[in-house]
Image: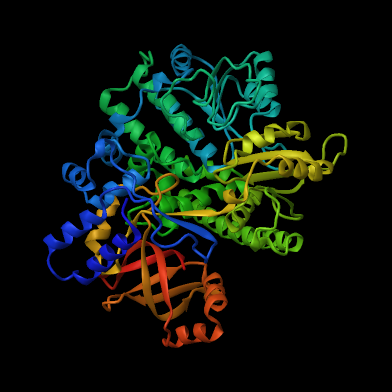
Amino acid sequence: MITPFEIKCKVLFLTKIHNRGNLLKKLCISEICSGACSYDAFGRRGRSMDSEWMQRGIQVDGGRTYREVADELGVSPVVVRCMCNRGITDVTDMKRYLRGTMDDLWDPMLMKGVADAVRLLSGWSGSAIAIASDYDCDGICSAVILKKGLENVGFTSRIYTPDRVSEGYGLNRRIVDDAIRDGCGLIITCDNGIAATDAVSYAVERGLKVIVTDHHEPQEVLPCADIIIDPKQEGDEYPFDGLCGAGVAYKLIQALYEHGDLPDKELSGKQRSDKLNELLPYAGVATVADVMELKNENRILVREGLKCLDETADIGLRALINSLGFKDKKIKAGNVSFQIGPTINATGRIDSVEKAFALLLAQDAGEAVSIADELTELNSKRKAMTERGTKTAVDMVYERFPNADEGELDDVLVLYVEGVHESIVGLIAGKVKERFNHPAIVFTDAASGDDGEERIKGSGRSIESYHMFNALMKCKDLTIAFGGHAMAAGLTIPKSSLDELRRRLNEDSGLTREDFVRKLIIDVPFPISRLTPGVIRELSVMEPFGVANSSPVFAQKDLRVLRIDYMGVGNQHIKLHVADEVGVSVAAILFFGSEQFDSYIIRKYGERELAGMRRGESGVRLALAYHPDINVYNGRESVQLRMVDWR
């Protein structure tokens, strides 16, 4: 094990020799990036967010050094170390991680139910196919994949979605009736259906064939569909069960194209590849928007999907990209997370989901531009609604738990927020979860039952140590409807059951105080004097970044604060100018964190020291955890840090 003193010496050594030649620097950086280092060289607590900083240096399988593997793969030792820190320790897996292509996807026929669905579709003729979708981004993209994918080989299809407010999530009897009225003989669900036992039974009774495609956790009783495709179902031996709904839909269409018996509709090899590539952006966008882990197949679907999105000729997608300001720009996963996905989602949240389908299925460029601009405006409205609702929810937590910041609050936060749109309670729950690092379920009013019973609808977001779906399964007797997975859930309950639900979830949470401590993994202790645009660009081979493949976190101690500047509306962002002991300076950016940073400085050093920072007269030294970044201004590149934490 490397000792704290050795780590400090190596960091200082690197800092002092940064101008002594590439060979010496290469040898030193390979030294710091070799061997397993579990000691936290930066201390046990990141006091800014009460987080625990842990330096990680997981070994390559077989005892090979980072440098040896880096030379074989043609990447830097830092990249190898970061891959190991994300659980990719086998060199073959590293090659797939770095260079995996569509040819590396698993055969869709391995997924339970897919072969049966291909046979059913191969023999299907005559009546139209009903696509029963959900109203979020994953459901919308799933439906578009199925509709375009089926129509490419001659099928006729129609998309049906539930009304979010009056009907709630999933397939229902009204959709079944509408499908029969419109002459459909087959229903294919997407991003829903695994919990729709009543509606599926009704569809079968009415004489429809039903294929369920879903990715959510199955409950005790499965629907009586003709075919169920869900990689999480019991007995499914598909190698990866982390696909989103659109990923499952894409795999079904892939299987149909590659294995279907479609004599009158068969595609040539190139046509098949081209048509699948046209659908790939939807699978990639949905995977990111539904916050799936970016590993295994998901990593390939997102990376290749983003490439296709950059080049897409799709009228609707192109209009949306331009409306959001990404024309002629390379789109990254972060752009999907914060702009593209939420904009598609906004229609199903606060307006009609039909607008999203009208955009993504548009045939007229002028119409698509108009709809895209409308969706962008809707998303701005949604953001404002979410901010107001989040402030109300956070204030409620502090009102009930004045010492919440000291950890004196419920293990599971169950809140009822009156007057917010039910479509944004999940977003609010996510914000509350992030603020307090506790599982959070936020409810608001829903339509009353037929008997006049008051009902509330909620959405939950969880932390890694709390399986929300399993916890709610124990309280299923209190629910009218619910579904979800480990990290998120949606449910409807009688309003009178709220207190009992809160009591049960907290009485048997299984959580300990340690579960609420934020864990910040430091990939590499890296001095700012070693950072160059070239070094940072080497990390781009790890993209796309997201859940389970986070952007690398570097750290350095003893950085002297030169000055603090404030930016943005209400001075909510900061630019912290810092320098190391040899005088190398850099700007560190913190978005939406000025109040938190100022509070930390005042608490530790006093208001006078904060005032000195603002004047450029400070003696404070900080350790910073950061994402290395490149700032481009007037065509010139410079290194900057995106602050993750400080102490």
- On the image, the x and y values in percent for residue 197 come to 67, 22
Q: Identify the residue at horizontal 65%, vertical 15% (top origin).
A: 204
Residue positioned 64% across, 27% down in the render:
195
**221 or 285: which is nearer to us?**
221
Q: Residue furthest right?
A: 451
Viewed as shown, does residue 484 lie left or right of 520?
Answer: right
Q: Nearer the viewer, residue 29 or 270?
A: 29
Visible residue check, residue 312 = no
Give the x, y percent position of residue 545: 38, 49
The foreground one among 419 and 404 is 404
**Position of residue 268 measured from the top left corner of the image (x, y, whole percent):** 28, 22
| Quadrant in which residue 110 is drawn | top left
Q: Quadrant of residue 383?
A: bottom right
Residue at 23% of width from left, 50% of height from top? 77
Give the total of numbered labels. Answer: 0
Q: How is the image coloured?
A: rainbow
Q: Is residue 477 above or below residue 34?
A: above
Q: Position of residue 559 (x, y in %)?
A: 37, 73
For image coordinates 39% across by 39% down, the residue present is 295
